[in-house]
Amino acid sequence: MTGEDRKDSDTRGAYSIEKTDRLYPDYLPEQEARLGILHAGKRLYDRGYVVANDGNISCLTAPGQIWATPTGVSKGFMTEEMLIKSDLEGHILEGTWAPSTELMMHMRVYKENPGARAAIHAHSPVATAFACAGIPLDLPILAEAVAMQGHVPLAPFALPGTPAVAESIAPFCLAYTGVLLANHGVLTWGASLSEALYRMERVEYYAHLLMLTGVLPQPAKLISPENIAKLRG
Ligand SMILES: [Zn+2]
């Protein structure tokens, strides 16, 4: 399938499923949230959705209070004492490990979507290939994806670890279930950790099917020289 063919689709992008009128879900008890984050991290790592110390996971356990993964550790081998508790302004309330700079992105999800209780960021390879090629997941080819996932839009490139990432995803947090981050990865959210995790799995599976049906390969959009310089610090 070519880029021109894709423009002929009448229905792509027309099937967002996030319900904004549902009752807001309960907050997860803190202990359950901590164990759930460890479980989700292991599952992401075991499935190859994160490598090395990539990715991050958070869970809202009370208004304005999250538990989240720290920076600099493999999400497949975390222990409970590594996790940190923070408010939505980034003030650490509990824990001794350093927070991820990507927590700003998670906090923005909770501010924009009052029904979100968990958020997961990963670099699953096929969905990230779409993010590198600048192609959203918006072709209605798969019944499960249409019913359960909806259109996964593409947020414009923003330097990882900067407030620009939170700005880039903000327009999508209420109406969608996840978003591709251009030249970077994937972010999903949900009413629980398991819903955010299932959505991450569905995004990757949907991307995989799109690839197998001919949407990829496509050339990647290259990161600009200015942003390459900034990434190298
Ligand atoms: Zn990332």
Image (tube, rainbow, N blue to C red):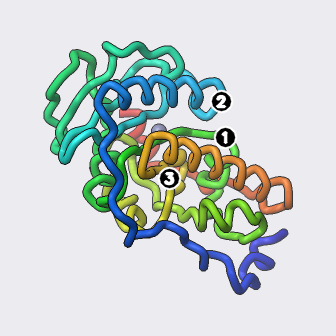
- Depth check, front residue: 31 or 109: 31
Beta carbon of the mark 3 residue lies under 8 A of ligand 1? yes
Report the amino acid beneath label 2.
Answer: Gly
Label 2 CA crowd tier, 10 Å (few <14, some 14–19, many 20+) = some
Q: Secondary structure at mark 3?
A: strand
Q: Residue at x 49, y 29 (%)?
A: 54
Image-based side of 70 in relation to 194, left or right: left
Residue denoted by label 2: 48
Determine contact: label 1, label 2, CB under 8 Å.
yes
Q: Residue at x 47, y 61 (%)?
A: 155
In primary-sequence order, the first of circles 1 and 2 is 2
Residue denoted by label 3: 181
Q: For the residues marked 1 and 3, what is the alpha-carbon distance in whole angstroms?
A: 13 Å
Q: Secondary structure at mark 2?
A: loop
- Depth check, front residue: 133 or 37: 37
Figure quadrant of the C terminus: top left
